[in-house]
Image: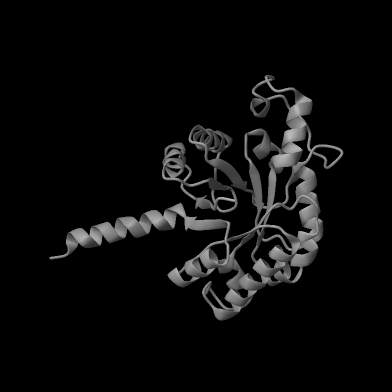
């Protein structure tokens, strides 16, 4: 499988999403957990991703069946669930994203079916097969429950959230702490044992080298806001040098 590279989108702009896709990213995680985003903003961002063949994923604030249904109806290809900690939460998320008999999602004939061009039964089959449910593990409870979470049918991929995990572990904002790294390695190992992909977010050159050397098929490049700030500050610094 070709490596899949994604980025967390905190600056909701259709133009930026289109640029990210043109830059070679495979998926964009549109953030509803920490950002105030209108339905129109979200739908335009999803369309911009579709234009350039970049998968639009949406990180919802919590396991909310109605919200999960709406973002999928808008065209999201995956739903990221932050701070997922139990198998019960994973089952509820899967049920919200799957049509009966695999779940409880309701059907609509809107844009996801091409406004009726794709038969409903064909769309239901495709959605139940292809839509990804992605737990984000950001707490000790989530780490401890990882095997139970991975055993839930329909969990497609697991993301790490090292910064929030370090806070939950009582370490402060230290995503590079050795104890956090050990937890990430544990998550990756359990995912491998269950044959479910693990998506790491390398924060240093050493971490990047590790995940590349150990077959990291899914990688998160970080957050667009931080990458843009870093590039803008670096460029300003270069131009201020004597």
Q: Give me the residue at 19% from left, 58% from top.
A: 239
Residue 169 percent coordinates (x, y): 63, 76
Residue 37 percent coordinates (x, y): 55, 42
Q: How is the image coloured?
A: one colour
Farthest residue, direction right: 101
Nearer the observer, 57 or 67: 57
Farthest residue, direction left: 242
**Residue 206 located left or right of residue 106:** left
Residue 26 percent coordinates (x, y): 52, 46
Q: Is residue 184 above or below residue 98?
A: below
Nearer the observer, 125 or 8: 125
Identify the image quadrant of the C terminus. Answer: bottom left
Residue 141 percent coordinates (x, y): 73, 70
Q: Is residue 114 above or below residue 79?
A: above
Residue 127: in sight, yes or no? Answer: yes
Nearer the observer, 185 or 142: 185
Q: Is residue 162 above or below residue 125?
A: below
Q: Give me the residue at 59% from left, 75% from top.
A: 180
Q: Give me the residue at 73% from left, 27% from top.
A: 108
Q: Give me the residue at 48% from left, 35% from top.
A: 52
**Residue 231 located left or right of residue 168:** left
């Amino acid at each position: 499988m070709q490596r899949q590279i994604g980025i967390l989108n905190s600056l909701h702009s259709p133009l930026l999403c289109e640029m990210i896709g043109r830059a070679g990213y495979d998926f964009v995680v549109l953030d509803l957990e920490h950002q105030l985003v209108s339905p129109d903003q979200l739908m335009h961002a999803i369309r911009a991703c579709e234009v350039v063949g970049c998968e639009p994923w949406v990180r919802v604030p919590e396991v909310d069946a109605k919200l999960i249904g709406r973002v999928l109806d808008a065209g999201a290809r995956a739903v990221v669930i932050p701070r997922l900690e139990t198998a019960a939460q994973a089952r509820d998320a899967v049920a919200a994203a799957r049509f009966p008999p695999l779940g409880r999602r309701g059907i609509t004939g809107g844009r996801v079916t091409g406004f009726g061009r794709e038969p409903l039964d064909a769309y239901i089959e495709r959605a139940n097969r292809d839509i990804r449910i992605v737990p984000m593990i950001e707490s000790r409870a989530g780490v401890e429950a990882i095997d139970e979470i991975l055993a839930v049918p329909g969990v497609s991929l697991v993301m790490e959230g090292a910064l929030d995990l370090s806070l939950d572990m009582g370490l402060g904002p230290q995503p590079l702490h050795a104890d956090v790294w050990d937890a990430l390695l544990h998550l990756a190992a359990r995912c491998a044992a269950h044959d479910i992909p693990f998506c790491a977010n390398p924060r240093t050159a050493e971490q990047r080298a590790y995940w590349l050397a150990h077959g990291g098929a899914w990688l998160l490049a970080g957050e667009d806001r931080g990458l843009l700030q870093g590039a803008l500050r670096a460029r300003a610094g270069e131009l201020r040098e004597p």
